[in-house]
Image (tube, rainbow, N blue to C red):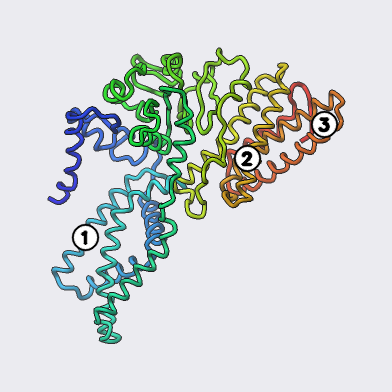
């Protein structure tokens, strides 16, 4: 009965579907079949999957994750008192009390077995661990209730075995307050969010700077929910439409949201991240969507394009870094990519307070936000390098290299300043700093070769010193990251170390 009552809130979904026009929704609740599809989480691939994809978690790994999390956040005291309660039940508890606690334990056990078996997060670490922790609130409450009852039983046990004074209610109250105080002291700093405006600053970093009526394609919970909240609830640029690419891939998106929230935007069917040649009738990919809308709207992507997206769009569109996002532009419209990049706003690290790494670990969205800021610092310089590679025989080579070096230099300076001021920790910046060092090494060494060919000895020596400095940083940090099993970066290191020629010139690394 209580279980059915607890699920009654699901009724508001079909009711609101027929009474209101949704601006945001997680499914189509207009029929029994679509309602059940949402309840069973079939949009994630199969019944009750926690996340989309083919990953598989295990009961053991998820249960161990809960024990570690609850022990860290709640201390070991609730576990100790809950275990004592179980011991009491087994040995000498009255029948009614024993039955009540057994039912409670059975409910918790059922939750653990069902959730831990279905949560398809493999090896939960970092942000995936943070996602998993959202679902520990219910068993944590149960653990605290059992621990509280166990504390009472433990005090009774001590009063019988040690001294009757422990039956004094004031002494018991003092002990309970002391235990609660220990938990507050343990968790207060980490959970003090009174100064947490990071989501607001993230929205401020991009939304006010977008052209009128822009479309922002998003991937992941962070940009989707932060931008959606601020555009709808805070009325920060309500003309900007936030289109979650995961929602776009749902069968119901075209019929439920496209005619209302995204009216005027051409949604040519059901989104599928395939190559154009593999699309069926009524399906579209990113290229088809851009073709249908790029002439009418400024289109951006925040976070990244889906990893499984086909490569067709890359042949026709460029992604120009635009603060913490990127803007799609037709390659046919780009005469000089350097001039286009220079007209777009930069990411400026000093504009936003950086989340404190001592409070926000890699399992938090704040840490993910910090990584997004840092990554955006290197985007423009990286684009300069890519353009230099693509145009290595053009007259713009020196221009591309010099501007790329300037942009990376600005990013490196911002990171070094933030480190000196204590706003960044080593784990935050090492990956981005390493990528910047790699590109700076490229810029300096190639410019060094060009200056040598022109006989400019002073400038050549300056660039040689610059190149050696940054390549040394890159190689050293890559070795450190290799020890941390950052295999992708190590492979990239080997690839670039193997590339020693550029525009027919050779130089030593």
The residue at 41%/60% (across/down) is 188
Mark 2 vs 3, N-terminal side: 3
Q: Which residue is under mark 2?
A: 490
Tell me where residue 243 sits by quadrant: top left
Question: Pointer 1: residues within 10 angstroms few (<14), some, or many (20+)?
Answer: some
Q: CA distance from mark 1 to mark 3?
A: 76 Å
Tell me where residue 71 sits by quadrant: bottom left
Q: Which residue is under mark 1?
A: 104
Q: CA distance from mark 2 to mark 3?
A: 32 Å
Observer able to see residue 152? yes
* SS assignment at label 2: helix
* SS assignment at label 3: helix
- In the rendered image of this protein, does residue 344 appear above or below residue 100? above
- Between 219 and 67, the one lying in front of the other is 219
Residue 328, position as x, y percentages in the image:
50, 22
- Quadrant of the drawing holding the C terminus: top right
Q: Which residue is under mark 3?
A: 459
């Amino acid at each position: 009965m209580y279980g059915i009552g607890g699920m009654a809130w699901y009724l508001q979904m079909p009711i609101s579907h027929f009474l209101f026009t949704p601006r945001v929704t997680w499914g189509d609740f207009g029929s029994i079949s679509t309602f059940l599809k949402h309840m069973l989480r079939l949009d994630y691939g199969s019944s009750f999957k926690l996340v989309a994809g083919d990953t598989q978690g295990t009961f053991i790994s998820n249960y161990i994750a809960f024990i570690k999390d609850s022990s860290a956040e709640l201390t070991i005291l609730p576990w100790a008192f809950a275990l004592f309660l179980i011991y009491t039940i087994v040995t000498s508890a009255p029948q009614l009390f024993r039955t009540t606690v057994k039912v409670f334990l059975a409910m918790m056990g059922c939750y653990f077995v069902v959730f831990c078996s279905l949560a398809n997060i493999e090896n939960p670490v970092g942000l995936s661990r943070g996602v998993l922790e959202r679902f520990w609130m219910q068993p944590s409450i149960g653990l605290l209730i059992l621990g509280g009852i166990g504390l009472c039983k433990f005090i009774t046990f001590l009063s019988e075995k040690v001294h009757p004074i422990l039956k004094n209610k004031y002494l018991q109250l003092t002990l309970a307050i002391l235990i609660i105080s220990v938990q507050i002291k343990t968790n207060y700093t980490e959970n003090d969010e009174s100064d947490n405006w990071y989501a607001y600053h993230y929205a401020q970093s991009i939304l006010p700077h977008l052209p009128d009526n822009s479309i922002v394609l998003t991937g992941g919970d962070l940009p989707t929910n932060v931008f959606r909240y601020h555009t709808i609830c805070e009325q920060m640029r309500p003309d900007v439409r936030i289109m979650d690419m995961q929602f776009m891939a749902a069968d119901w998106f075209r019929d439920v949201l496209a005619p209302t929230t995204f009216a005027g935007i051409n949604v040519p069917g059901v989104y599928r991240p395939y190559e154009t040649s593999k699309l069926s009738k009524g399906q579209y990919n990113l290229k088809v969507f851009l073709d249908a809308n790029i002439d009418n709207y400024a289109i951006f992507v925040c976070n990244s394009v889906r990893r499984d997206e086909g490569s067709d769009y890359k042949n026709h569109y460029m992604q120009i870094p635009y603060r913490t996002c990127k803007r799609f532009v037709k390659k046919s419209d780009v005469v000089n990519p350097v001039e286009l990049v220079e007209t777009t706003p930069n990411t400026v690290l000093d504009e936003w307070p950086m989340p404190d790494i001592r409070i926000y670990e890699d399992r938090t969205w704040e840490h993910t936000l910090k990584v997004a800021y840092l990554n955006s610092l290197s985007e423009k310089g990286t684009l300069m390098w890519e353009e230099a590679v693509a145009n290595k025989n053009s007259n713009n080579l020196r221009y591309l290299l010099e501007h790329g070096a300037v942009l990376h230099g600005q990013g490196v300076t911002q990171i070094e300043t933030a480190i000196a001021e204590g706003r960044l920790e080593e784990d935050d910046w090492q990956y981005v700093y390493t990528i910047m060092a790699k590109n700076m090494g490229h810029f300096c060494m190639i410019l060094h070769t060009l200056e040598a060919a022109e006989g400019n000895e002073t400038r050549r020596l300056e660039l040689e010193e610059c190149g050696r400095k940054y390549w040394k940083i890159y190689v050293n940090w890559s070795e450190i990251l290799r020890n941390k099993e950052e295999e992708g970066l190590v492979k990239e290191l080997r690839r670039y170390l193997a590339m020693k020629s550029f525009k027919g010139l050779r130089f030593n690394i």
